[in-house]
């Protein structure tokens, strides 16, 4: 039996995540997931790919406040989620997409600039900004996402992680892959083939397996690069073309609420990617 076992949101792109027992599904993903982002002086997004230190910033939501803590210094930044933004509009770039964002405040940007020792601005995606997902993998043509890499939700199986860890010299945590949803049951990597599926009463569509990058090699507890794993091992059995795959990108078909323990039912499947043995 397939069951939802873990739920995560990442309020600020590339910063620490929050484990939840339940979550609201909105049109752009889990509520409060990646609605904030750090950008450089040109509005380009900052991520752990270039700045692994971002992992040391932990996020927490209490009542209506987003609390960001620098785990090395203990210093906190508190943001009111009801009024997170100033009127300072910024053209923010995530990969090939440029969307209008609002700077949270000069004080918030200065807090990160001082913590990182380089120029950074904290921005927020308002409701008026609609960032569409890749049209090639769209179902309706109007799906949107937040500041995620490209899709509103990422799902991964515990069996997939267990299979990988059995091949590694040292086991890693699922947080290396930064999923939104984790499930138990089923076969390793079966999520690759999921097309239409439900979590509780909420319906989703898997559209394409997720290509993985150097972020998976960063220890999320320390912000330090931990060598070449798990990419080195994944490359041996999870390589399709020039991409290494783990987890499934998901689009939302129905809004609602999901909770840990919800049953998952796979309604239809799609053709699997062809993997190279290297």
Image: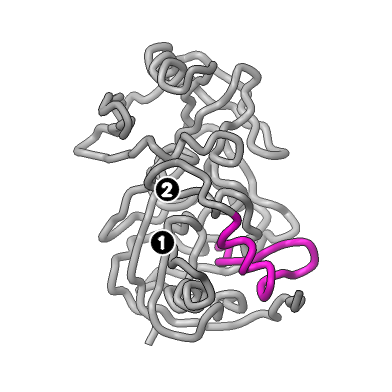
**Percent from the top left, x then y, of residue 170?**
45, 66
Question: Could you tell me which residue is drawn at 19 percent across and 38 percent down?
Answer: 63
Residue annotated with mark 2: 220
Question: Could you tell me which residue is drawn at 52 percent across and 32 percent down?
Answer: 128
Quadrant of the rendered structure where residue 208 is? bottom right
- Name the residue at the left extreme: 63
User: Foreground: 63 or 211?
Assistant: 211
Secondary structure of the residue carrying tag 2 is loop
Mark 1 to mark 2 CA distance (whole Å): 9 Å
Residue annotated with mark 1: 173
**Percent from the top left, x then y, of residue 197?**
50, 76
Quadrant of the rendered structure where residue 3 is? bottom left
Binning the other alpha carbons within 10 Å of mark 2 as few (below 14), some (14 to 19) or many (20 upward) gives many
Secondary structure of the residue carrying tag 1 is loop
Question: Could you tell me which residue is drawn at 64 percent across and 50 percent down?
Answer: 133
Q: Is residue 114 visible?
A: yes
* Residue extent of the magenta highlight: 228-250
């Amino acid at each position: 039996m397939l069951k939802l076992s873990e739920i995560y949101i990442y309020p600020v792109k590339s910063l620490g995540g929050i484990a939840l027992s339940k979550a609201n599904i909105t049109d752009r993903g889990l509520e409060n997931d990646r609605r904030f982002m750090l950008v450089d002086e040109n509005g380009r997004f900052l991520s752990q790919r270039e700045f692994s230190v971002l992992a040391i910033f932990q996020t927490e939501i209490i009542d209506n406040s987003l609390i960001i803590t620098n785990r090395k210094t203990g210093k906190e930044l508190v943001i009111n989620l009801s009024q997170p933004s100033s009127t300072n509009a910024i053209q923010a770039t995530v990969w090939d997409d440029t969307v209008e964002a609002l700077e949270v405040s000069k004080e918030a940007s200065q807090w990160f600039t001082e913590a990182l020792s380089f120029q950074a601005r904290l921005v927020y995606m308002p409701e008026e900004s609609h960032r569409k997902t890749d049209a090639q993998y769209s179902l309706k043509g109007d799906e949107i996402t937040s500041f995620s890499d490209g899709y509103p939700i990422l799902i991964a199986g515990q069996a997939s992680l267990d299979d990988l860890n059995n091949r590694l010299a040292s086991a890693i945590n699922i947080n290396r892959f930064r999923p939104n949803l984790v499930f138990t049951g089923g076969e390793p990597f079966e999520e690759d083939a999921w097309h239409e599926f439900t979590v509780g009463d909420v319906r989703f569509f898997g559209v394409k397996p997720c290509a993985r990058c150097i972020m998976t090699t960063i220890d999320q507890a320390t912000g330090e690069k931990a060598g070449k794993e798990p990419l080195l091992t994944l490359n041996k059995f999870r390589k399709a073309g020039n991409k290494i795959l783990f987890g499934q990108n998901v689009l939302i078909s129905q809004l609602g609420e999901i909770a840990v323990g919800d049953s998952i039912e796979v309604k239809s499947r799609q053709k699997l990617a062809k993997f190279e043995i290297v």
